Image (spheres, rainbow, N blue to C red):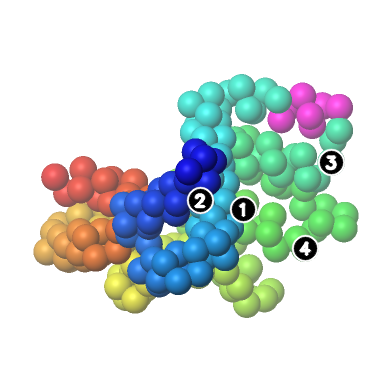
Amino acid sequence: MPIFALLPYVLQLLLIIHIIRNGKPFVWLWLLVFIPYIGGLAYIIVEIVPELSRNHAIGDAISQALHPEGSIRELEEQVKYQDTVTNRTLLADAYCDSARYDEAIALYDSCLSGPYSDDRAIQFKKIRATAAAGRKDEAKAAMARFKEEGKLDSGEEVLLDLELNDDYDKMKDIFFRTSNFEVGYRCAEHFHKEGKDAEAEAILTEMSDCMRRYRYLRRTDSKQWYAKTKRLLG
């Protein structure tokens, strides 16, 4: 038998190994066995291609995290030659990522004028940067105005509102309902500071159980939030 005739079988075996090692749903095994060519193509499109895209995006994010000042310099040059609201917002976001909150807030302020004066996305970014800068009372007042002008549309907006109002019991409920590890970390950090270690440990225990039950979480940012929570309480 020519070697190239074995290639479909080798590919099928590699896909089966990938399914088992990565804890993918076993329905893929049935598809590969009973309709190998169509099942294999479907698995590559649905599972492997998005995974490769995510890994590429993660690589870009890691590169930016390791060299944040390089990215900022590029964005500053971009704003210098193309001073648009979009470019200023991107630069402000980069300042936030580097904890340069005052510079970010000033840029967000400069964007909130003219046709963008009521832009809720930029308003929220400014509130979030203000809170991160430690100006909690100012951020809380701005969030109250933000809520009066329209409903909170995203989970991120709801969570920041709860955090600014110290409603960590509701945040804890959200964590246990959704298994959002970032929310869990924020709650554990708060409870730990308040000396409520039993509540913080309960969150860590739930994270551990989720990591054990749902293997896919090990390939998401949940793994990093889990590690941060362990270090926090260790």
74 inside magenta stretch: no
The Cα–Cα distance between marks 1 and 3, rounded to whole angstroms, is 17 Å
Task: Judge whether 86 appears above or below 160 on screen.
Answer: above
Q: Say few, some or many: other residues with alpha carbon within 10 Å of mark 2 (under 14 / 14 to 19 / 20 or more).
A: few
Q: Is residue 28 visible?
A: no
Q: Which tag, 3 or 4, sits closer to the chain's start? A: 3
- Label ID, residue 84: 3
Q: Amino acid at mark 4?
A: Asp
Q: Amino acid at mark 3?
A: Thr
The residue lying toward the viewer, choosing from 214 and 202, is 214
Q: Which tag, 2 or 1, sits closer to the chain's start? A: 2
Q: Are marks 2 and 3 in contact (CB under 8 Å)?
A: no
The Cα–Cα distance between marks 3 and 4, rounded to whole angstroms, is 17 Å
For residue 165, which quarter of the picture? bottom left
- Label ID, residue 181: none
Find disc 2 in the rendering and name its residue.
8
